[in-house]
Amino acid sequence: MSSFLPTEQRLAITCRRYPEFPREPAVLVRLVKHIHKRVHDGANAMLKPWGINHPEYNILMMLYGTEGYTLNPSQLADAAGEKSANITRLTNELCDKGLIERTASDEDRRKVTLTLTAEGLAMIKGFLPDVCTLLDRQAGGLQPREAAQLERLLKKFLDHLDQG
Amino acid sequence: MSSFLPTEQRLAITCRRYPEFPREPAVLVRLVKHIHKRVHDGANAMLKPWGINHPEYNILMMLYGTEGYTLNPSQLADAAGEKSANITRLTNELCDKGLIERTASDEDRRKVTLTLTAEGLAMIKGFLPDVCTLLDRQAGGLQPREAAQLERLLKKFLDHLDQG
DNA sequence: AGTTGATTGTACATAAATGTACTAAATGCA
DNA sequence: TGCATTTAGTACATTTATGTACAATCAACT
């Protein structure tokens, strides 16, 4: 039995009570919400032994995925989908843990450079096997063709959200 | 230009540095995250004039989508995807605003019944047109066939997350 | 009846996220 | 140059979410 059934039944009642209610968009939005929650919780549980949480993991991985392991706070905010005020707090914590380093930029003295430290890189290499296992398991229900199709449709969805 | 491109480039670099990294699952997870964020923010902006936020909206709509406009806190937590401690706080606020009502259950005196009030129902009827417009706009980039396919794939994704 | 174990909901402390206001520095232009 | 405007980043207050511990109730069994 799917965990989504109750939600779907409630949507059916909603549509009966308010016939203009657009069922399909509502279903998609709620599915995204449910999936996001499970993925987020699963990631947090997996990362707990490493002493970091999902947002912190995202920041580390954004730096790992960048040439030179370096980004500004504003780039990070954009990349990790966090508000800039949030980045300050998160990067402070990561600095305290010695995983990233904060230095002033030379070219533009308003800017700050955040760089992965050797310890940060070591931690990433430590948890990456677990991350790979988790990701493979999370998306394991989909055939390669289905996954590719899902990627295409989600991108189309997102593109339209960006415009509108 | 898609807002997802930088993320995709970072994933490419990550895969180069750590070849076992499962690109496709990671792309899917990050797409879900991005979409969720935009949907959530959009909903909050739309609801602001009504004096409620997205989680509160979800709770109201769960009740609206139930026969008798009534649920227990635990059912609500499950339905709205919130932790039960969170439900207490949210429903307290909604009670204070007079949108829902909290009464003790007769059959099981541990339980509490949360019911939509007339004012709550009136507010829902007030914002539903805006909600419909927003939902239609958010999912407007997809053809009906694409939306149905996306629904199918997301459900498969979620089902597998529930099992594993 | 009495005891045990599970469930329901809440209070309280803690953590995480956001909004707002502000400083410092860069940019554009008269 | 001098001044307004824009941008980057952070500090602080507020809002929102989570974890933990607890009291009340129920259900099952002796």
Image (cartoon, coloured by chain):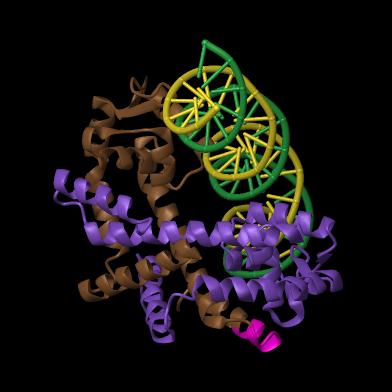
Chain colours: A purple, B brown, C green, D yellow
Q: Is residue A20 above or below residue A112?
A: above
Give the residues in magenta.
B12-20
The residue drawn where x is 45% and y is 76% is B2
State the image coordinates of residue C20 (x, y, percent, origin top left).
57, 40
Q: Nearer the viewer, residue A16 or A157?
A: A16
At 55% from the left and 76% from the top, the residue drawn is: A136
Task: Look at the image and tell me whether residue A106 can be seen.
Answer: no
Left or right placement of residue B142 versus residue A43 in this view: left
| x then y, percent, for residue B94 | 40, 29
Give the left or right position of residue A16, taking residue D3 as reference.
left
- Quadrant containing the N terminus of chain B is bottom left
The answer to whether residue B34 is seen in the rendering is: yes
Q: Is residue A130 left or right of residue D5?
A: right
Q: Nearer the viewer, residue B145 or B51?
A: B145
Q: Residue at x 63, y 82 (%)?
A: B21
Toward the viewer: A101 or A15?
A: A15
| Residue B9, image quadrant | bottom right
How far from the left and from the top, in percent, is residue D26? 42, 25
Name above or below for residue A56 compared with residue B79. Answer: below
Identify the main secondary structure in magenta.
helix
Is D20 located above or below residue B16 in the figure? above
Residue A62, image quadrant:
bottom right
